Image: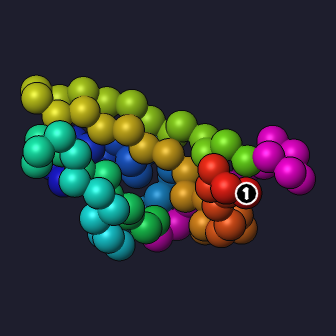
Amino acid sequence: MNHNFQEVIRQATGADSLYHIEDIQSLWSGYGKIMRYGLRGGDRAQACDDRCRVPACLALEADADEFLMVFEDLDASGFPLRKNARD
C-alpha cells in the first residue's frame, strides 16, 4: 500500500500504525483487490442498533490510478456473524 494511503487511514481512524491481515479478494482480472488491515491504536466502533450493523466509511481517497476505500471492520467491532441469501 502506498504511503499516502497509509497516512489517510491513520488520520481517518486515529490509529498509530496499521498492519496487513489478509488479501480477501482479487478484483477485475488483477486490476485491484480487497485487503484487510488491522490498526494499532484508534477506536472506530459504532452501531446503528442491536439488530443492524453497517460498516462506517472512514475514508475515500484517489491517487493516480488507485482508489482507496476504508471501512470499519465489523469483526473487530463485535459483529462476526454474516447473513447469506439462504438465512
Let me know if residue 3 appears in the view: no
Residue 54 on image: x %, y %: 67, 43
- Residue sitting at x 24%, y 27%: 62
Part of the protein shown in magenta: 40-52
- Residue sitting at x 39%, y 31%: 60
Residue 6 on image: x %, y %: 28, 51
In this picture, residue 36 sits left or right of residue 3: right
Which residue position holds label 1? Answer: 87
Q: Is residue 48 magenta?
A: yes
- Residue sitting at x 55%, y 58%: 73
Residue 4 on image: x %, y %: 21, 42
Decide which of 27, 73 is in the foreground and name it: 27
Question: Which amino acid, by three-letter code, is at mark 1?
Answer: Asp
Residue 32 vertical placement versus 25 (above, below)? above
Q: Residue furthest right?
A: 50
Decide which of 37, 29 is in the foreground and name it: 29
In this picture, residue 52 sits left or right of residue 63: right
Residue 37 on image: x %, y %: 38, 63
Residue 46 vertical placement versus 40 (above, below)? above
Quadrant for residue 83, please give it: bottom right
